[in-house]
């Protein structure tokens, strides 16, 4: 039981670090977005592209931050590394690459497949 408690503390620390780094990246991008000057007519297309790219990066980081927060809650409740959908253990290799993962690979793939179908084509 001591080993499990130590591992949970390590995972919580890792997730908190991931959260801090993600928030810092998001703040940097938001500062960059605010600092972009109004473009001249010649620069409008390039500037619009840069703004959209930066905004998309911010949105991706916001989703990651939400995932990290959910994983932190799971870790604090002693359920870190357990798939929220099927209850099986999430592969350690997956958690090494994606510490905020809350679903096993199989359930995540199914979730993404369902969401792809639900989205209207543009």
Image (spheres, grey):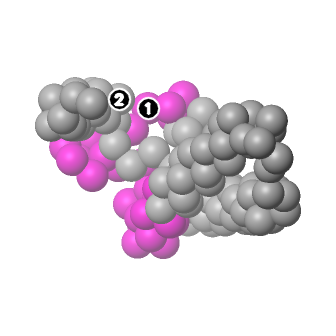
Q: Residues within 10 Å of mark 2 (few under 14, many from 20)?
A: some
| Residue sitting at x 39%, y 49% | 102
| Residue sitting at x 50%, y 32% | 94
User: In which image quadrant can residue 53 be found?
Assistant: top right
The residue carrying mark 1 is: 91
Q: Is residue 69 above or below residue 18?
A: below
Q: Residues within 10 Å of mark 1 (few under 14, many from 20)?
A: some
Q: Which residues are magenta?
A: 67-94
Answer with left or right where residue 94 lies relative to residue 41. Answer: left
Answer with left or right where residue 121 lies relative to residue 103. Answer: left
Contact check, label 2 and label 1, Cβ < 8 Å = yes
Q: Position of residue 63 (x, y in %)?
A: 48, 54
| Residue sitting at x 54%, y 53% | 59
Whether 76 is among the magenta residues is yes
Q: How many marks?
A: 2
Mark number for residue 105?
Answer: 2
Q: CA distance from mark 2 to mark 1?
A: 8 Å
Q: Earlier in the sequence, mark 2 or mark 1?
A: 1
Secondary structure beneath dot 2 equals helix
């Amino acid at each position: 039981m001591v080993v499990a408690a130590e591992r949970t503390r390590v995972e919580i620390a890792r997730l908190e670090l991931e959260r801090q780094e993600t928030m810092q990246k998001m703040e940097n991008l938001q500062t960059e977005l605010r600092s972009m000057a109004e473009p001249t007519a010649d620069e409008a297309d390039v500037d619009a592209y840069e703004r959209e790219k930066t905004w998309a990066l911010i949105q991706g980081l916001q989703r990651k931050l939400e995932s990290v927060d959910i994983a932190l809650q799971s870790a604090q409740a002693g359920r870190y590394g357990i798939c929220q959908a099927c209850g099986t253990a999430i592969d350690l290799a997956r958690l090494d690459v994606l510490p905020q993962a809350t679903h096993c690979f199989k359930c995540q793939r199914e979730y993404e497949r369902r969401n792809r179908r639900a989205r209207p084509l543009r």
